[in-house]
Amino acid sequence: MFMNLSDQGCAVKRPLPPTGVASDNWPGESFNHIVMKTPRKNSSLTAFTLIELLVVIAIIAILAAMLLPALSKAKQKTQGVYCMNNTRQLMLGWKMYADDNKGFFAPNQDNNRVPRWVAGSMDGGSVGQVPYGAEVDATNSQLLVDGNYSLVGPYVKNPKMFRCPADCTTWNGLDRVRSYSMSQCVGTLENGIYTEPGPQYLGHWLAGTSSASTPPYPWRVYAKDLDIVAPGPADLWVLIDENPQSINDAGFAFAMPQNPSASQGWVDKPAKTHNGACGFSFADGHSEIHKWLNPGAIPSLISCERGLAGTQNSTPDGIASNPDVLWCAHHTSQLQPGVTGVYPN
């Protein structure tokens, strides 16, 4: 009895060719030798041990600790570039206003009266006039470009230019709209000239007094472009990135030191939000980020929310020969013609 093995699904083993005879010469057959390997089953699977896993985590943590500061500095550098662009745009608007007003600069009186170069108090005040009523200035971006109140605003058009990208401050949960202030000895008074009846003087803070009835003698003030001869346009700062804790109206008060060895302090405080540096723009139109040598004498921000009480940080800043105050003095004003024997000259 013969069985057809192929019909039963069984493989038929073919005979091997005789020894010494090539398979391709074996008549009627072609031999293809197929070698089938059965994969060996691993008896144990490899995996991280607890120690190896901890080592990997430690390496990742070390790399993160090395990279995060670099990323933070890169972010701060980018913010500095945008800050300089903002103040550059504001300076263009400031210069165009002067060109349209016979060389006289926009008003920058030491209060929040309007119109002025930019209106609005960042410490909770309000212009209190139509159409804003009691709306808080600190969050009113439209006020910055309203030509009825802010004279440089219509030349700038974009209210975002008034806020430094490194400024995190809010007022009752909303972003504050302005970070920059103007040197209190640059600009005119409300009537467009140096003095007003009363009398009221431009630049009285230079003499170290809050009384606007005190003349700035012996220091120069700059009400029009022809006044900027000492220091020159490239050395006279106009706009500053003010400290979020001292910013109120749009004027930055600065008292000129009487001698280099005395205790030198700030009236209004500059910012240090650019990695211990501050944004400045100068009368020639250029902007820069100035690195402070003694940032510890400048208050650090406690809280970004400025609408809450009790968030002020008072830092003693009366430091003998404070190099930052002295640098600022040399770029704020110089002695009036004919005055000698007063520091700095």
Image (cartoon, rainbow, N blue to C red):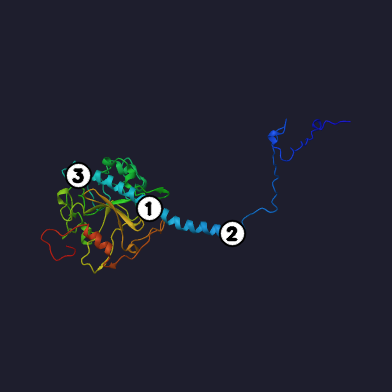
Q: Is residue 168 visible?
A: no
Q: Are marks 1 and 2 in contact (CB under 8 Å)?
A: no
Res. 76 mark: 1
Closer mark to the observer between disc 1 and disc 2: 2
Residue 98 bears which disc, if any?
3
Residue 59 placement, left or right of 50: left
The kind of residue on which mark 1 rests is Gln
Which structural element holds mark 1?
A: helix
| The N terminus, quarter of image | top right
Q: CA distance from mark 3 to mark 1?
A: 33 Å
Picture coordinates of residue 178 (x, y %)? 33, 48
Q: Are marks 2 and 3 in contact (CB under 8 Å)?
A: no
Camera sees residue 286: yes
* Pointer 1 or 2: first along the chain: 2
| Residue wearing tag 2 | 52
Amino acid carrying mark 2 in the image:
Glu
